[in-house]
Image (cartoon, helix red, strand yellow):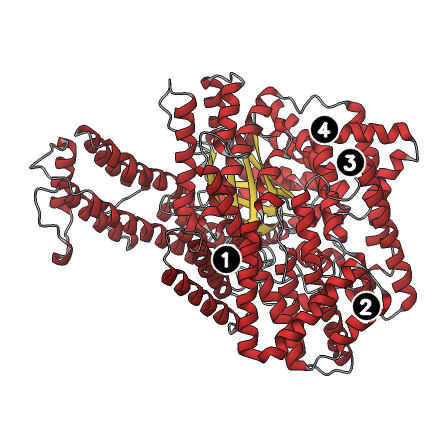
Amino acid sequence: MIETTVDTNKKDPLRRDVRFLGNILGEVLVHQGGKELLDVVEEIREMSKSLRANFVQELLESFKNKIETLDTDKRHNVIRAFAIYFHLVNIAEQNHRVRRKREYERSAGDIIQPGSIESIIAEFKEKNVSNQDVMEILSGATLELVMTAHPTEATRRAVLDIHHRIAEEMMQLDNPTLTYKERELLKEKLRNEVLILWQTDELRDRKPTVLDEVRNGLYYFDETLFDVLPDVYQELEHCLNKYYPEQDWHVPTFLQFGSWIGGDRDGNPSVTAETTWHTLEMQRSLALKKYREILSNLKEHLSFSTSIVKVSDELLTSIEEDRKNIEIPITDQWRNSKEPYRIKITYMLQKINNTEFSVSNENTKYNSPDDFINELKIIDCSLRGHFADYAADEYVKKIIRQVELFGFHVSTLDIRQHSKEHEFAITEILSKTGIEENYSVLSEEGKINLLTELLNDPRPLTTVNLDYSESTKECLDVFETIYKAQKEFGEKCIKSYLISMTQGVSDLLEVTILAKEYGLHRIKPNGLSIQPVPLFETIDDLHEAPRIVEHLFNIPIYRESLRDVNDLQEIMLGYSDSNKDGGAITANWELRIAMKDITDIANKYGIKIKFFHGRGGALGRGGMPLNRSILAQPPGTLGGGIKITEQGEVLSSRYSLKGIAYRSLEQATSSLIRAGMLSKRKQELQVDPEWEQIVQGISETALTKYQDLIFRDPDFITFFKESTPLTEFGELNIGSRPSKRKNSDKFEDLRAIPWVFSWTQSRYLLPAWYAAGTGLQSFIQGKVENLKILQNMYENWSFFKSMIDNLQMAIAKSDLLIAKQYSNMIKDSSIQERMFKSVEDEYNLTSKLILDITKQNEILDNVPVIQESIRLRNPYVDPLSYLQVELLSELRALREQENDDTDLLREVLLTINGIAAGLRNTG
């Protein structure tokens, strides 16, 4: 049903797999709906391809008529056929990525794969980068990838599980040693899986709970990350030892995962203090389960006998200590006294069990991950003592790295809450204690002075005797939970408290005050065991950010609190809301300016900044490949490390298969090391000031153009709501969090996710490119010399190149021919014609100028693989788009008459899932 999407000389295996899976789907369609169903699907597919090849109005009308005259049952099955087909194509493409990686590895020694860890280390050696410089880069470069539960994963977990099984079975088909019978059995299993996929409901019948989302996030740790992440470290150490053999390398922890799932309460009333506690329990439970599995496997392999080898006295002593303190169930005891490693591991397994159930006797459990690591090191050292280095390297070294990375908490959980919630709580607390009648009406300066005074006062503010409102109680409960969690699960379990919509220094001091109430902020010794992290989201907030940060660092008690955390301050930047607020050009530019200005201020105060980049999966939310997002940062801003959100469908696309997860993290590691070198040499900082002034002017013009449409055109909201599936998005059960911050229809209260999701579904992708053409044109103004300047900037300035390339990716994925069909749903024809023409004109201008600047003949000539992928996918997404428009029109007409049709809504939601699978991202 679809052609392949890669280079000609490498595409045959992928074409084979796509054809094979497409044929199986065809067999299932015939089996389930008869040949008539397959014929209808094929007819629609052929008409869609013909329309793309040669657009003719008569053919369009015939195509639309074919879709409109489908009976309900057939229409339902046609939608599912196209949607499931894209699922299968996506699986084939993912498997092909793994296949290509393996091909590179098979030719190791001849070819080093671009973007691999070996490629960057080999390049360093070739450029005579010293091992000292390499060590400094590795010690200073850190990356934390933070999973969030943002509702953009349109595919159910049950469906993803089927995808996983199909992927595994397709990989087995590549095994050249399979017999004919084995191959036929595999094919039969695949037919069965596709049949199960066809008979599995793609839609959730309810919204997932927060704990459902926690389980979904932990799935990736259980399935891939526990194994893959240590393998990345092992590969880096292997490459360092290969190219820099004069040093024995143990790479410090530089790459880790964090999470918001179960901690992000901004606008989600379902995330409570109790939910956060349950999340941490679930995370610990998974970590200990994994260690039980790993130790049990280790026990099978370490059968060394004292009849043959001499183990260390330290190991024997530790076993005797365990005998005195730990009681082992008879069924679990190891009776061969000459196999000390197995005896030791038996006790270690019991300690793991006792740790999970919080046994009170400290000698019978692991009180910290360090205790566990110390015992693993005893085993490691003993093995090496009788020259069992291979066993130590193969089995024990990886476990030690796993405990270093995942501890007993799997991932550090961030807490996030809206700034107004803290202000409300502080106002109530200060009023009830008689300190300040109405804190919320004080000026910003008045708030800062009062809060600073209270921070310097060691006396508590709150008391259990005061009766607070439910929201204030919950706010206080969160801080109490953090305090208890750090005691129970270790301080690393929660480290950052993110403050949404930070607009002043008082927003951070309010959180510091609440932390102080529960012993999370101490005056003597100075320190914060949880750090308030400002989140700057809108364009105005980004403008104010440097001033806020400088004022904060000028407050002595806060500045002192940073000394215990190595003078490090975390700051989060919001890509989604800044883009929604100011458009793609302005958001990118203002984020860059804010980062540079904040870094300059921090340097003045001797503070390192860890920037937390809140990127979404879609282009309109700052989405891009992980390795590119790392290299997109100005090198001078990397001093304190990087955090980046990983959310929605990005998690399944990057981390559901071990091969893909490894490649993603390998590329991220390579890019992080490269960025560390660029930062060290400050190459990027030597940008022509004139270029920066040019982009500043382009940004200002683009902002005006963007906000003229979004905020100042009275018909825009009508245009948006009626020509996209915004309303229906709220009925797709893909997340526990509401799509609006408040029960409001105001644009400013709409979250960035449904904003981008809706424009993506309707094929406009408007947030990712609108106003860029006008901005660029404001500088070019038809002058050849000005165009040449932008061409030079594109060739020689990585920031500008990245911005233009993101724009052309957005333009390539947009499709105004399809978007026009969505605009026809607007009831007022004058609004429809005027608004669509405005968007169309800007689209055409942006496309033309991108081609002029890049000197290309067509959009995405610079990445032909993606260009071809989009070209080949579009004809197969189109039927789903036309069907969605038809279904939305019917459903909305019914609802206007105060009627409804759950089956019709279900079909709408199925098209949303299908288009999401076809376009490869949602929001």
Disc 3 marks a residue whose amino acid type is Thr
Q: Which mark is residue 854?
A: 3
Q: Residue at x 84, y 38 (%)?
A: 776
- Looking at the picture, tell me which residue is in the foreground, 402 or 792: 792
Q: Residue at x 83, y 71 (%)?
A: 61
Q: Which mark is residue 826?
A: none
The secondary structure type at the circle numbered 1 is loop
Q: Position of residue 525 (x, y in %)?
A: 43, 31
Disc 2 marks a residue whose amino acid type is Leu
The secondary structure type at the circle numbered 3 is helix
- Disc nearest the viewer among 2 and 1: 2
CA–CA distance between discs 4 and 2? 44 Å
CA–CA distance between discs 2 and 3? 33 Å
Q: Quick one: label 2 or label 3, which is nearer the N terminus?
A: 2
CA–CA distance between discs 1 and 4? 59 Å
CA–CA distance between discs 3 and 1? 66 Å
CA–CA distance between discs 3 and 4? 13 Å
The residue singled out by tag 1 in the image is 466
Disc 1 marks a residue whose amino acid type is Leu
The residue singled out by tag 4 in the image is 797
> On the rendered image, what quadrant is the C terminus found in?
bottom right
Q: Quick one: label 2 or label 1, which is nearer the N terminus?
A: 2
The residue singled out by tag 2 in the image is 60
